[in-house]
Image (tube, rainbow, N blue to C red):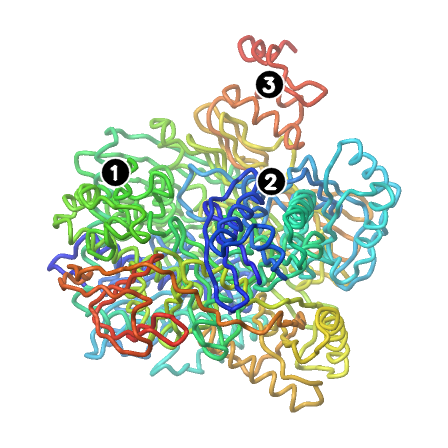
Amino acid sequence: MISQPALSGARLAVLRSRMDGISRKMSKALTRAGRSGVLNRAKDLSCAILSPECALLSAADSLPIHVLSGPDLMARSMLDAHPELRRGDAFLHNCPYTGCSHAADHTILVPVIDDEGRHRFTVLVKAHQADIGDSAPTTYFAGARDVYEEGALIFPAVQVQRDYRIIDDIVRMCRARIRVPDQWYGDFLAMIGAARCGEQELLDLGAEVGWDVLDAFSQGWLAYGERQMRDRIAGLPALTASGSSRHDPMPGTPADGVEVRATVRIDPGAHRIIVDLTDNIDVLPCGLNVSEACARTGALIGIFNTLGAGVVKNAGSIGRVEILLRDGSCIGGGRHPTSFSVSTTNLADRIVAAVQIAVSEVLPEMALAETGAVNPPHKGVVSGIDPRDGRAFINQLFLGSTGGAASARADAWLTYSHAGNAGMSFVDSIEMVEMHHPLRVLRRELVPDSEGAGEHTGAPALTVELEPIGAEIEIAYVSDGTINRAQGVCGGAAAGAAAQAKRTQAGVVDLPPFGHLRLRPGEALLSVGTGGGGFGDPRRRDPAKVCEDVRDRRISRQRAWLTYGVAIGEDGAIDARATTELRTKGPSE
Amino acid sequence: MRFATDTGGTFTDLVVEGDDGLWRAFKASTVAEDPVRGVLDALRLAAGDYGLTLRDLLQRGDTFIHATTHAINAVLTGTVARTALLTTQGHPDILLLREGGRPDPFDFSTGFPKPYVARRDVWELPGRIDADGSVFAPLDEERVIAILDELAEQRVEAIAVCLLWSIVNPAHELRLGELIEARLPGIPYTLSHQLNPIPREYRRASAASIDASLKPMMGRYLGSLTRRLADAGFGGRVLMVTSQGGVMDAGALAKAPIHVLNSGPSMAPVAGRHFAGAMAGDAIVADTGGTTFDISVVRDGRLPLTRELWVGPPIVGHLTGFPSVDVRSVGAGGGSIGRVDRGGILHVGPQSAGAWPGPACYGRGGTEPTLTDAALVLGYLDPAFFLGGTMPLDVTASERALATIATPLGVDVTAAAAAVVELATETMAQAILQITEEQGIDPERATLVGGGGAAGMNLIFIGRRLGCPRIIVPEAGSTLSAAGALMSDLVTERRATARMSTVDFSPAAANDVLDRLQEECAAFAAAQTGDPAEADFVRTVEARYADQAWEIEVMLPAGRLEGPADVARFRQAFDAEHQRLYGFCDPASAVEIVSWRVGVACRLKNAGARRLAEIPGRLDRPARAITLPNGERHDAPVHRWSDMPVQEIFSGPAVVESFFTSVVIDHAQFHRAADGSLVIDL
């Protein structure tokens, strides 16, 4: 094959494709073989390859919040804790104080060691667990005062395999603490299997092309990412802009919630973007704090989202974004024993929003509205005893969240879920949920008139109604967005809010936005997940699209009239003359 | 005489099996607005070649086998019947929400895909069945009738029905069928549990909607096809190729037209299996056309089925969940365009120069460098002898096009061409690895079978990249699908959903399910052929470890399941398969069987020679300079395919050429096998 001292653009492309193929293969194996629904139905997992210097090389097919920052920090902590690595080692990591996103994301790290004993790569398999042994049956414990109350077993790069053999001590500890231990163990085996599969592929690749060539690839590939990013930044104007987004109040937060602020400084001369997250409040006495990995990643997601597809995500491009955090801040500055239980979603999504809003207001051609918040009860952790077989169960539901934000270029991606997930996860099938849990999903549909209105529309909200069958069930949830809806940008409107209620014999009662809900047979949960913000003036929206949405009962004729300035006749067709009048003069009522 | 036609987007391929058992291949242009005309045009060409009139030719035929892209094109372009979806109340957005996933998490330019049936045509029915089959809420027939009357008023042309848990208790769907027939006689409809009895409502709803939406047009198309063939003199049997890799009577297909969606591509592995000589063993079948690269596999001599075949691109296309031959299509053919981005990295595809203007060397205005241009510059194609010399190629145009990427790469034009071939090879290899990984096939123990006109340009390098020990290019490789149709069986299968765990396994209950499926298949076979020995039965289950969500398919032993020993044998087979697919197994965990399947394949006719008749004409070409991707230059002898003595072993570098294709060979040894195939040993 053609080889040169520095690899050619052709060779880099070939090896890049092989690396991405390996990370994809790992995540596919894990999805298929995983035991819990959160893995095998929802695919809440990521796989990555890092250089021995802990630089992110490839994370194809991963969730953004899992990988942009975090794998680098975790690989570093593995090296710190285990300076002597041997082939056959594997480490379990879920420690948010040394680089993991939050305790629920169990991560297997496997060093790839060549025949001479040199550490060549690290492969990483990260998967949100169905349970991690928290003191309450949830993996999103918003009420946890600190890590002690949270109660999860914490593994700061703890060895779980030596010479390819599982160290049973760790397994016994986990089995003694984690709910539904067989389910956890099945997931653990699948994660190790996926990591070993990635390791073997890399060993084969090294043997085939030579380790020196792979070293040259790593350098060339990171340099390429850096070059791409430098070019992209050089084409932007120099400016500074700020944005903010507010999380709803919950126990442990200030009474008006948590405002998350971000300042973005674009410095085209230095080919650098700085995201300043230091102007945020102190650590909270609850599980909403954002870990360092998630704070960094939240800022990066906001930047990469507005830059658009096409920029490679590796340590080279990521290195052009400098992220400023403040010690002691709830946004990436917490220390042990702060609880980061809900670190990957709620406040982290608000970081992404603050960055997107900052960029949108000054660079409208790159604008992207705010994504809807999570986690409504229909995406909560459900547990109980299944009356059909008497077995305990626990698992996160993925009954769907919409929340996609409109951009300057297009309408929203409907099943976006939330900023950290970016639509990568799967949506549960009703039948699969009912097969695996003793519950009945009575309703799942979009809410009319709830989209983020705009020239480009944000996703409508989604409503779900479910009830237990034959036994009590418990649902733990942390639903942001009931008060603070997803904001629109550049004249676009905010989207429909979250809501949660319980229907009993006595009628419908509102539920708090966070809690451990117990539902008895005969009671039903009514849950609404948020929509996403709109982009641009709704009166600039293509009337034909408005008309389609009216015909499809997504929006009412009244909303078409009032918000979009489009007149739709009784026959479902556009009244062109009335529409022109509406759009020039505004509605007369 | 037997005829097999494959109507593609550009060409309609025809392979005729003469009474001497030999094949002749023909190509006519596809006529998009009247595909039957393309078929008749190809038949006219054949008649001319045999020295017969069209009527004489057709009167000698006993079987006409047809594969078509007509249905899939209609689905992709939305030119199907206006179809209503009737579904369970509270769940009108099944087709919109789909199953999630996203091609690129940072792409905010691509809109969300539209549902196959728009919300305005989705109707929610009061009535609910639970997971255990019990009726939670009865079907509100009054409301149903009101809806059906509304559908009549709106002139809906077809109806799909998908209710939650109809696979466990079909009573409500069946009643809807009766009501539709009573209120809307003549309107075609599809019941999801009858078409595709699997859990996951999106897949069932999607399959039922696609099927119903195709019924009016495929009914017309098949009627027109059979009538016009009959008018032209054909009195034999018309069979349609299915996505399952078999054929069925045109009349049966009209009742479930979804079977024809992937009909052409599903035949390539049927042919590939034959030419690989692999009734046992694994093979990879790669069919390279101008714009797409279709891949399928043969596992242990069987064509593995998948439920994850996308109609259109993954995630944004439609998923039917329908078991189909696993054929993946990627945008990487001879027309794939190479470019260098601002960061200095080379890309090849997925953009393609397509059939028009095509590669730069076609001289039709293309200026961007394609894989075909690279192959021409490297000497893999003969500019004066492309398609037997019927289409001269412009080397200078190729060089000019490649110079646009050579400069930013900092290499000469030849090295740039080598880079394009290498990267295209890698893209194709990655596509192959995705399917081999999912189907548990080790490429290092699989035969690589190449088909399609553009295969020979880099098949050898794909084989090297994957470590395949042997490459086979069949003589009829350029019409692999039509050839496959001539050797396919009449197939059907029956499936049932019935959950059963190894913890409390009941052989009696299992035998009840299997016996019922077996009887139905046997009845089908008996109706097709008087001789039961001509039918092969296969029994499989889809199973998983307790709590897993995705099943894997495992073969069951023949005969009745008797006791614990049979269950233990099945369990071991499951563990072994899981180990093979995912690298680990969990013998301590219970295994749950979710669904049962019996398939039957009835052989249509004793095989002919399966050889192409010799084409007269000379093909003496001088040796020519080729450059391998590693930069080595060689003076390569050019062998005429049909002149190569059978079983004589040659050494590369060399080029083997026929009127249809050109195969470049590096240092490997190669020979022509007794069946006419070119065999390359790596």
Three-letter amino acid code of the residue under disc 3 = Val
Q: From the viewer's perspective, is the residue at label 3 or at label 1 nearer? A: 1
Q: Classify residue A137 as left or right of residue B130.
A: left
Residue A139 or residue B517, whichever sits in front? B517
Three-letter amino acid code of the residue under disc 2 = Ala
- Could you tell me which secondary element the residue under label 2 belongs to? loop
- Could you tell me which secondary element the residue under label 1 belongs to? loop
Q: Are marks 3 and 1 in contact (CB under 8 Å)?
A: no
**Image coords of residue B561 (percent x, y):** 70, 85
Q: Are marks 2 and 1 in contact (CB under 8 Å)?
A: no
Q: From the viewer's perspective, is the residue at label 2 or at label 3 nearer? A: 3
Question: Mark 1 highlights which residue?
Answer: B367
> How many C-alpha atoms fall within 10 Å of the one at disc 3: few (<14), some, or many (≥20)?
many
Residue A252 or residue B305, whichever sits in front? B305
**Image coords of residue B11 (percent x, y):** 46, 47
Residue A529 or residue B531, whichever sits in front? B531
The N terminus of chain B, quarter of image? bottom right
- Distance of mark 2 from mark 1, alpha carbons? 54 Å
Position above or below: B601 against A138: below
Residue A59 or residue A510, whichever sits in front? A59
Q: Are marks 2 and 3 on the same chain?
A: yes
- Could you tell me which secondary element the residue under label 3 belongs to? loop
**Image coords of residue A15 (percent x, y):** 26, 60
Three-letter amino acid code of the residue under disc 1 = Thr
Q: Are marks 2 and 3 in contact (CB under 8 Å)?
A: no
Residue at image position (58%, 42%) is: B74
The disc at residue A498 is: 2
Q: Are marks 2 and 1 on the same chain?
A: no
Question: Mark 3 highlights which residue?
Answer: A566
Residue A125 at least partly seen: no
Chain of the residue under label 2: A
